[in-house]
Amino acid sequence: MDVKDQLKQYQCKVCSAHATGFHFDAQSCSACAAFFRRTVTLNKKYRCQIGKNDCLIIYTERNLCRACRFQKCLQAGMKKESVQPKKNTNQLRAYYTNSGLKRNKRFAAASILTQIDRPSLSTTSLESLTSVNSMTSTTPEPTTDEDMLSTLSSPRSFVSPIDHIPMYRSLSSPIDSPLQLLIDEEMRIAERRRIMFCERPVGSLLGASKSCPYTKDDIKPLVFRNFRKSIRTHILLIYEWLRALPDYSTLSMNDQIALLRKCVLYHTVLDPCYITIQIGEMDKFVMQNGGYVSTLEDCDDGWKDEKEISRSSKKLIYWPLLNQLMTAIVAPMIQMNLTFEEFVALKGLVSFQGTMCDISDAGRPVLKRILDSICQSLYNNVSEDYDKAERFGNILLMLSPIFDTALNFVESHHQVQFFDLWQLDSLLLQFLKNKV
DNA sequence: CCTCAAGGTCAAT
DNA sequence: ATTGACCTTGAGG
């Protein structure tokens, strides 16, 4: 085969330009492919101006007659059926598929932020994507802020929440700080959740020192009925979480109840967010019992009709809430690579700061002491890889979106009750009903 | 990791 | 308004 024939092998079957592959089942260049796609999606009808329907289609003159170009596309073997129907403009594109996430976790996180008001990619997210890609392959000296950001997610300085624990433990003093007690308790909670909600051999349930209760294989689409049944269990875990702090039992009974009440709210908001991040599949929002709901609009996992609550009621109440959780809490946490210890500290700060106004004058100094201690430990244990003050500040900045979301959470549940949509656990209702 | 073939974007026309 | 280079995505290897 001579050179001429070899070149011809890779010609566009429509216009004889260099083909870029198979498009809609025909070997063609990207220009003819784009032309064909547009013609089909927009349902365009052309007429040959010459009237003979046999215009020469060659890449220098391929735009002279659309009718003949389209006809030649069909002759070359392009299939109209291979053009996918035009996406509904108000239907958001799924950015969080597994393969998409695998390719670029940081990008996916950023896209959650832009999902609601900006369905398409902004120039800035494209820029950051490009710079992240180039960073991971070459790793030059970080010079700009953008570079510094990218360095945080590079393999060298990336510390996964789980890897981080042993180092942290070795730092713990003989008398454990509140934060250390909460970290230990959080890991026990993970173990308890595993035991209660995973169907696995006992050996793999016990003793695991992991901070995440579930693996990708454990999680299943959420059944609201099952979740309702598990609510008391979650409340019990929260009660135990509080009791991990010796100071808790020194509070008056009213203060203990007030604290528990607020913690039920805040933990119900925060825990699934962090479990979701640990599982790492952004198309699945994973709840405390290992049930997940899909974050994709066109996937019904966890949203199906149930006897107690219809799909549309679920969507009405929980979809906006889910969006807020993903945007205001999950996305920022992913972006800053929040470690397990930092999450536990944040959870503590939210729990105690958010309760301050409900606590008696006698109890406030106790809470204040716990808060100060957690802040101290958090600041001391921010990794040296970061600008300590900046990272500490960024973690504190998470507080207000969390409080906002919690407020909405309470409001939505008032709505649930008002419409009598489904029977919530009576204990949870007692916690949510009284003063916000 | 990678490639392939979809869809989307937008400066140039 | 149309074109086409260039981009990301998702499936599959």
Image: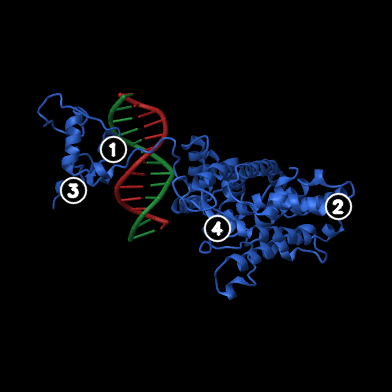
Chain colours: A blue, B red, C green
Q: Quadrant of residue A214?
A: bottom right
Which residue lies under the disc numbered 2? A366
Residue at x 79%, y 50% (from the top left corner): A258
The amino acid sitting under disc 3 is Gln
Residue at x 16%, y 34% (from the top left corner): A57
Q: Position of residue A205 (x, y in %)?
A: 60, 71
| Mark 3 or mark 1: whose residue is earlier in sequence | 3
Up the image or down, A137 lies above or below A163; here it is above
Q: Are marks 2 and 4 in contact (CB under 8 Å)?
A: no
Q: Name the mark on residue A37.
A: 1
The amino acid sitting under disc 1 is Arg
Which chain hosts label 3? A
Q: Name the mark on residue A219.
A: none
Which residue lies under the disc numbered 3? A9
The amino acid sitting under disc 4 is Gly
Q: Is residue A255 left or right of residue A92?
A: right
